[in-house]
């Protein structure tokens, strides 16, 4: 499982694009999907914290925190921009941060209220996706723009995966669930790998 820092080192331009959409309104803002005890999805708005150290989220005592503590699989999607239909998406596994010095440092960065019962999680990155639909300011949200340009990165350290970043113009369903119990919302790894020869991303 790759950390955000490892992903960003491997694909810095893609990571910058995703980070921009996650932080477009100042503090991080996105939708977090977790797995309920019955296997169904649960979605909540959250404020992710992205630093050079990694991708983190402070989660208060709630059903979504219990989901992460029990299962760990997650998907995080950006909030829609005001001037385009661009979207960013990452998925992987959440793990509690136990280093108290690190927790304190990130709590200061994320301005986490000390009196609130929260727990800090680090999100690993199994898959990352960025979809662009025209230049900002030239396309109104909801307006037909043709097929988006989609970049998908897969963790090269994941079982059965080869290092790959693909760029396609096909519509990617970021809400689909991978077969075989992958991370929440991970696109089918086989379909991405099958098309990588024709759509290798430019450096």
Image: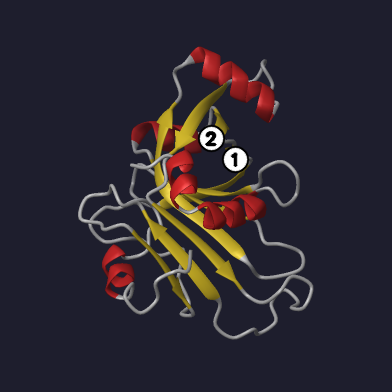
Please report whichever mark, 1 or 2, sits nearer to the chain's N-terminal start: 1
Which residue corresponds to the image point at 35% horizontal and 79% vertical from the top-left?
198
Element type at mark 1: loop
Q: Which of 65 and 102 is in front in this view?
A: 102
Q: How far apart are marks 1 and 2 (CA)?
A: 6 Å
How many numbered marks, from 0 up? 2
Residue located beneath label 2 in the image: 56
Compared with residue 97, is residue 14 higher up or lower down, i.e. above or below? below
Q: Position of residue 2 (x, y in %)?
A: 37, 42
Compared with residue 189, is residue 112 higher up or lower down, i.e. above or below? above
Q: Where is residue 167 in the image (x, y as percent from the top left)?
A: 45, 72
Q: Label 2: how many residues lie within 10 Å, few (<14), some (14-19) or many (20+)? A: many
Instruction: Mark 1 and mark 2 in contact? Answer it, CB < 8 Å.
Output: yes
Q: Position of residue 10 (x, y in %)?
A: 43, 50
Residue located beneath label 1 in the image: 48
Which residue corresponds to the image point at 25% horizontal and 56% vertical from the top-left?
161
Q: Nearer the viewer, residue 115 or 139?
A: 139
Disc sitting over residue 129 in the figure: none
Q: Where is residue 98 in the image (x, y as percent from the top left)?
A: 44, 18
Image quarter in which the N terminus is found? top left
Element type at mark 2: strand
- Asked if residue 115 lies left or right of residue 178, the reply is right
Q: Nearer the viewer, residue 157 or 10?
A: 10
> How was the colour assigned to the protein in this rendering?
secondary structure
* Residue 112 seen in render: no
């Amino acid at each position: 499982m790759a950390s955000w820092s490892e992903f960003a080192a491997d694909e810095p331009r893609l990571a910058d694009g995703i980070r921009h959409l996650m932080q477009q309104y100042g503090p991080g803002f996105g939708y977090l999907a977790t797995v309920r005890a019955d296997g169904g999805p649960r979605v909540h708005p959250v404020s992710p914290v992205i630093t050079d150290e990694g991708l983190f989220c402070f989660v208060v005592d709630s059903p979504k925190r219990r989901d992460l503590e029990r299962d760990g699989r997650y998907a995080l999607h950006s909030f829609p921009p005001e001037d385009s239909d661009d979207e960013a998406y990452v998925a992987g596994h959440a793990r509690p941060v136990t280093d108290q010095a690190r927790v304190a440092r990130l709590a200061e960065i994320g301005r986490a209220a000390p009196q609130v019962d929260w727990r800090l999680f680090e999100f690993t990155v199994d898959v990352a996706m960025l979809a662009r639909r025209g230049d900002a300011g030239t396309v109104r949200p909801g307006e037909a723009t043709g097929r988006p340009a989609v970049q998908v990165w897969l963790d090269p350290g994941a079982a059965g995966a080869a290092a790959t970043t693909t760029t396609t113009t096909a519509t990617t369903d970021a809400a689909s669930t991978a077969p075989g119990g992958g991370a929440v919302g991970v696109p089918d790894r086989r379909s991405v790998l099958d098309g990588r020869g024709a759509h290798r991303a430019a450096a």
